[in-house]
Amino acid sequence: MTLEPLLIVELLVLGVGTGFLAGLLGIGGGMVLVPFLTYIMSTRGLSPDLSVKMAIATSMATIIFTSISSVRAHHKRGAVRWDIVKGLAPGIVIGGLLASLGVFALLKGSWLAIFFGAFVTFSATQMFLDKKPAPTRQMPGTAGQLASGGGIGFLSGLVGAGGGFISVPFMAWCNIAIHNAVATSAALGFPIAIVNAIGYTISGQNVSGLPQGSLGYVWLPALALIAVTSVLLAPLGAKTAHAMDVKRLKRVFACVLYVLASYMLYKGLFA
């Protein structure tokens, strides 16, 4: 897989779109990157199994950069709940390591694609229906946040996303305002990305058939090109998020996820 001019343009444009969505929805861009990177890699000669795994790993690595840019913009507006970040982060680290160092390498790419599509469809439906939580529901205590963070980190590690597709609905379910949930999710994307990117790099060291420029399952040329443009657009997405009403923001989130989940389900079932 060579880095020809058309591929460079595709990756730069993808970075623009995912950077904006990272700031807008607090999803780290992974929900967009994984389907598109899977398509780009599979059309350039990589096996379906390896295409899905490298798309997931490379997507996760880019979130290291987009989350920093996005969270700075949200933090300036005072929207990040750092107390929640502190409570969920330890579990996220544990769950992410379990996924990226162990389960990810053992599962076939088709199963990962199906899991991605099914779980994201469920998350999108919850957001689109705008189900109201019980007025008395709050964030769980220390043990509950440790367990919740573990689940977020583990599931994120399997699908290559910054956790927003789980953490945003979870926080909304606990009566955290949607703008705070999106901003806090952006902050959570950083530890998720760091831990899982390290895991993908280690677990992919002895895999055959990786393209030139790979570090484990992470394809460095795509990482560099997407990171450059996504970092520039994330603040614009964050600014847009704070100008939108709550219901519209939730439905934008849901519609984006529906489209991308459908592609990954198709890829897992029929590719």
Image: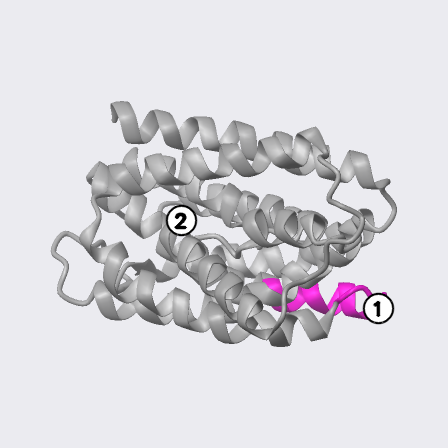
Percent coordinates x, y for residue 175 in the rendering: 76, 52
Q: Earlier in the sequence, mark 2 or mark 1?
A: 1
Residue beneath the point at 63% across and 34% down: 254
Res. 199 in view: yes
Q: Residue at x 19, y 67 (%)?
A: 205
Picture coordinates of residue 41 (x, y %)?
A: 32, 41
Residue nearest the observer in this picture, 101 or 36:
101
Numbered mark located on residue 78 in the image: 1
Which residue matches tag 2? Answer: 159
Residue type at the position of mark 1: Gly
Could you tell me what secondary structure mostly forms the magenta stretch?
Answer: helix
Magenta stretch, residue numbers: 67-80
What kind of residue is marked 2? Val
> Looking at the rendering, which quadrant does residue 13 occupy?
top right
Q: Position of residue 95 (x, y in %)?
A: 40, 65
What secondary structure is found at the residue carrying circle 2? helix
Q: Residue at x 51, y 32 (%)?
A: 121
Direction from residue 18 to residue 133 in the image, left or right: right
Q: In the displayed structure, would residue 141 be above or below residue 180?
A: below
